[in-house]
Image (tube, grey):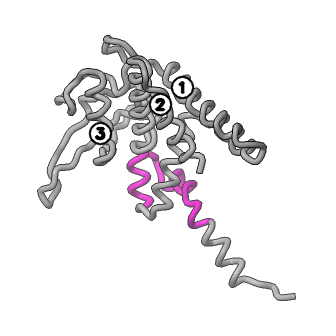
Amino acid sequence: ELWLEVKAYIDAMPKETNRERAHYFRVRWLFTLLYLGGLRISEVVENTMGRFFCRRDKDGDERWWLEILGKGEKERLVPATNEMMIELARYRREVGLSPYPSPNEETPLVLSIGKSRERLTRAALHVTVKKVFDGAADRLRQRGDDYAARADLLEHASAHWLRHTAGSHMANQQIDLRLVRDNLGHESLSTTSQYLHADDDRRHKETEQKHRIGW
């Protein structure tokens, strides 16, 4: 529910001026990377658009990937889904680039606003993410006291919350946990297992139904 609130807030961001429009599309692309890619903020800052590449699978279908140099200087391949590629093309057009990057292109994954091709710093990315969470929290509070607790949760969220949200949603959609581990670049399945909320819920339900004392 909180993730839906964040998306609704982003959709409602102002787009009247050129600067507002640029900020909106940058935020939309940033949150696409953090959620669909499950990327860390450091991975957004340190990688470039030239790390996107396309190859054919065994059935001959073209599939896009994003090669990420991540934590501990380890590389992993993140599936660049159709949704991600649509958002990438949209963002690149907005900043005056061709829809898809060329191999080894040095354009940062997220650009600062303006005509320069400078990357957005890690600190600026954190501020951008926090402002979105704060804005979404304010919108929740305007609905009344019943939404205060959820607003408090959003105000304490960070970019890493999006990574955990991505992991939770992938696990809840029954994506093989080994694939979730590889998507997020975890060292072991034990780290990824924290996202198995659905299994916990089922475990609680079945225990309550079938393991009874019957006083």
- Cα–Cα gap, marks 3 and 2: 15 Å
Tell whether label 2 touches label 3 (CB within 8 Å).
Answer: no
Q: Which mark is residue 66?
A: 3
**Would you call the spot at circle 2 few (<14 residues within 10 Å), some (14-19), or many (20 or more)?**
many
Q: Which mark is residue 126?
A: 1
Magenta: main secondary structure:
helix
Q: Tell me, yes or no, if residue 198 can be seen here.
A: yes
In the figure, residue 86 lies in which quadrant? top left
On the image, the x and y values in percent for residue 9 come to 54, 37
Q: On the rendered structure, is 14 left or right of 98?
A: right
The Cα atoms of the two marked residues, 1 and 2, are separated by 8 Å
Regarding mark 3 in the picture, which secondary structure is present there? strand
Residue segment shown in magenta? 176-200
SS label for mark 2: helix
Is the C-beta separation of discs 1 and 2 under 8 Å? yes
- Identify the mark nearer the N-term, 3 or 2: 2
Q: CA distance from mark 3 to mark 1?
A: 22 Å
Q: Is residue 98 above or below residue 120?
A: below
| The stretch drawn in magenta includes residue 177 | yes
Q: Residue at x 46, y 62 (%)?
A: 173
* Quadrant in the picture for the C terminus: bottom right
Q: Is residue 133 magenta?
A: no
Q: Earlier in the sequence, mark 3 or mark 1?
A: 3
- Residue 37 lies in quadrant: top left
Would residue 72 be visible to someone looking at this image?
A: no
Amino acid at pointer 2:
Ile
SS state under label 1: helix
Give the residue pinned by disc 2.
Answer: 41
